[in-house]
Amino acid sequence: MSGRVRTLAFALAVIVAALAAASLRAVRAGRAALASGDAAMASDRPAEAIADWEEAARWYVPFASHVDDAYARLAGLHANPDHAIAIAAARAERRAAWATRHVTEPHDPAVADRTIAALEAEDPNGALGAGNDRAARTAWQAARLARDPRPGLGASALAVAGIALWLAGAIGALVADRRRLVGLAIAVAGVAAWAAGLYNA
């Protein structure tokens, strides 16, 4: 095996290890947030439970069970007799879906949009100008939600910069023998920035 091939294999191994470590961190944090939310709900603290379950849903890792469990718990509050709790849960579900929406769409924000529109339509004063018809109020709320912007520019820029750093660091590690560790450090920093951008989007 030539030196260049060994260098490439080492760089790839570092990148894979960094991604694995980030995924493990996300799974642990997601499970902890899910458990914290369960404890809060058991202690009759629904607002804290909703916040924790939203955090768990945001710690997205493909096929991780805590993500679907968090969405299921939030959805379970849609029929809560306390209208404020039901709305808060649906909005938390929507925020988490938008935050984890990137190349793929693991959870469709439109699902939460429909729930929010239906719940908000119960308030005759919540859709001024839409009239007293419930269907009209629901449509008004749905249209308002559909205009909601995509994730913030700052978080998106951070994610893009992270990808650029990741690629630049990996290439630098391959072509600059004397500064290989610097390149690898830049690649790892890029992965961290990319993950942070996606999480905070």
Image: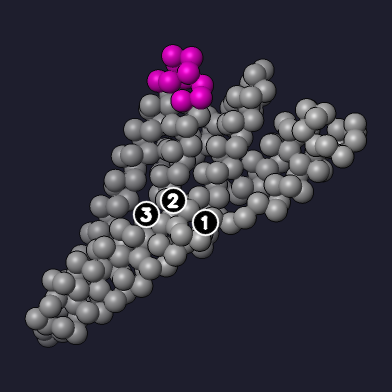
Classify mark 3: helix, strand or loop. Answer: helix
Q: Is residue 80 left or right of residue 136?
A: left
- Mark 2 crowd level (few <14, some 14–19, many ≥20, 10 Å Cα): some
Q: Tell me where residue 173 sits by quadrant.
A: bottom left
Quadrant location, the N terminus? bottom left
Q: Are marks 3 and 2 in contact (CB under 8 Å)?
A: yes
Q: Which residue has dot 2 on it?
A: 200
Q: Earlier in the sequence, mark 1 or mark 2?
A: 1
Q: Are marks 1 and 2 in contact (CB under 8 Å)?
A: yes
Q: Which label is found at residue 196? A: 3
- Mark 3 crowd level (few <14, some 14–19, many ≥20, 10 Å Cα): some
Q: Which residues are magenta?
A: 39-48
Label 2 is placed on what type of residue? Asn
The structure residue drawn at horizontal position 38% and vertical position 33%, both measured from the top left corner, is 33
Q: Is residue 154 magenta?
A: no
| Above-or-below relation of 183 to 77 | below
Horizontal and vertical percent position of residue 171: 25, 79
Q: Which residue has dot 1 on it?
A: 152
Label 1 is placed on what type of residue? Gly
The structure residue drawn at horizontal position 12% and vertical position 78%, both measured from the top left corner, is 179
Q: Tell me where residue 122 sits by quadrant.
A: top right
Residue with the most extreme left position: 178
| Above-or-below relation of 198 to 144 | below
Instruction: Tell which of 127 and 36 is nearer to you.
Output: 127
Nearer mark to the viewer, of 1 and 3: 1
Classify mark 1: helix, strand or loop. Answer: loop
Whole-number angstrom distance, CA of label 3 to CA of label 2: 6 Å
Is residue 59 in sight in this rendering? yes
